Image: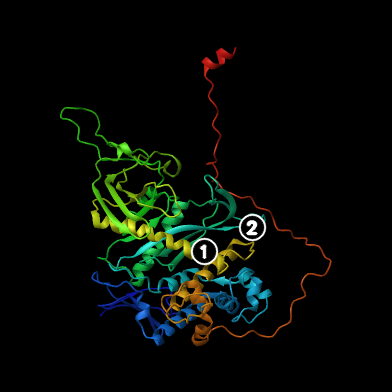
Amino acid sequence: MRRIWCPIACLLTSTAADRCVVVAAGGHRVPSCVSNTYTVEAVAVASSMTQAVNYCEDLPEADQARRLAGFRGELYRCLTARADELFDLADAVLCADGPVRVLAGLSLAPGHCRGHGAVYDALNAGRVDVPRLRWAVGAVPLPCWPDGRIRLAADVCNWLRPEARTSPERMFCHVHGRGNNAGQMIPGWPYSFVAALGPGATSWTAPLDAARPGPRDDPAEVTAAQLREVTGRLAAAGAWREGDPDIIVVLDAGYDVIRLAWLLADLPIVLCARLRSNRVFWRVPAPKPPGMGGPPREHGTPVKCDDEKTWAGPSVTGGAETARYGTVQVAAWDRVHPKLAKVGAREHHPGKIPLIEGTLIQLQPARLPGYRELKPLWLWASLTGAGEPEIAVLWQAFLRRFDLEHTFRLFKQVLGWDAPLLRDPAAADRWTWLIIAVYTQLRLARPLAADLRLPWQRPQPPGTMTPARVRRGFRCVRDTAGTPAAPPKPCKPGPGRPKGSPNRHKAPRHDVGKRHPEGKKRTKRRAKTRPGRLNRKL
């Protein structure tokens, strides 16, 4: 066993000047607490594992309960103002009967000891030490894969606030419709989430970070900063070490994966993102014939995603059998790049724009759910020289990205993430991190909660239940883990505003949309008139 000392702000322990990370051989990375020193038992994941399970479930029940109690204690220390009410509010979300619809209704749930007025007061006037909470969430063990490789997914989930004219920093959020071209742009707060994915079809993920892009922020730069912070946090916690395989990050088509690959070129990650069906990439050009002058060629023959005639000559071909999509035919083109111009974010790029090469992957499924039209799926990965096994790992990791949609649905429909009618976006950020802490407790209580199923539900043994089923049995787990929050003190309500007095301090109204920096506002292009057309009119 070798010890690596590193300064860590906090990880499931009380404050200490120095933190210790213990790396042991033969097992998995398991964080634990010993007095005032945070210890992480980081163990290399052998590539010869035959069964992909969460190693938290292999621990004795007493250790699992102790780990949950340790996280709850660290969560309480992350709440620097209105700590007791914020912690009771998290317990109320976990112990409430049914989905959370109204925030004030949580004051009646088991685990909440204060009145309904304290609920909104805690979110508006409370404080959360987000950097410390990030470390606490990142110290929880990640889902295990047979090859020991980490898979991350980044996606945006919108908190819609269409009628909140007094809420600042709202942006137009894209909402999908049921028909073709039925999407809408609705004002709200977009949140960018980064989560770790697990193997197999499951509704469990491991949310690690959340950020709200502002009206003046660049979405690509916000995502790059998130992935850089999460990667550094995983490396500091011992989840990734030098010599381990690169971390796979899967993205949807809304991300500028080419620019992200350029911004994150120095990190040990591989980006794999879905592409639109009208993208065009270019192969490596053939060498010029001897004696031909001029500059060297940069672009070879194109590969058009919507033109089957240009799909010839893939570097890797293969197929795989899947339960949901049937036989999937895979083709990949190595060392392809897009044509980039000095527009948008690359307008002020110094010098010549470099060629960013990657691997273009095409997936052709045999069937799709819902009787949809069979169209090929296009992916682009930020690596070159990949063989058939690496290509299979990338596209199979992308299919697991849809597990994050289950987490978003649980956040909104069960935990009530977008239920509060908050005005201040800072309060929305506190509530978002509180929901992430709630979900992390469900992950830790997964092998401890009993299956309190409804009469029409099938029984599920502990360790295999969905997050909603674990939440139903969390009330008994909470009684065992205890709570660090102090009981409420008796007090009298304040006088409030005198009856009949008008509100003399009305909240300001805010516009919706992006804000362009000074000097970079968009200007309308003037229509150019052609002399020929003008003469014909005369």
Secondary structure of residue under mark 1: helix
Dot 1 crowding, Cα within 10 Å, few <14, some 14–19, many 20+ = some
Residue 407 image offset from top left, x and y in percent: 48, 65
Q: Quadrant of the C terminus?
A: top right
Dot 2 crowding, Cα within 10 Å, few <14, some 14–19, many 20+ = many
Residue 170 image offset from top left, x and y in percent: 59, 54
Residue 11 image offset from top left, x and y in percent: 42, 76
Q: Is residue 492 above or below residue 361?
A: below
Q: Quadrant of the N terminus?
A: bottom left
The alpha-carbon separation of the residues under discs 1 and 2 comes to 24 Å
Q: Amino acid at mark 1?
A: Arg
Secondary structure of residue under mark 2: loop
Q: State the residue in front, 37 or 195.
A: 195
Q: State the residue in front, 65 or 7.
A: 65
Q: Is residue 257 above or below residue 132?
A: above
First in sequence, mark 1 or 2: give its number.
Answer: 2
Q: Which residue is mark 1?
A: 409
Furthest residue to the left? 290
Q: Looking at the image, which residue is at 60% across and 81% down?
A: 110
Q: Amino acid at mark 2?
A: Ser
Furthest residue to the right? 500
Residue 427 occupies quadrant? bottom right
**Residue 34 can be seen in this image:** no
- The colour mode here is rainbow
Q: State the residue in front, 527 or 112.
A: 112
Q: Which residue is mark 2?
A: 167
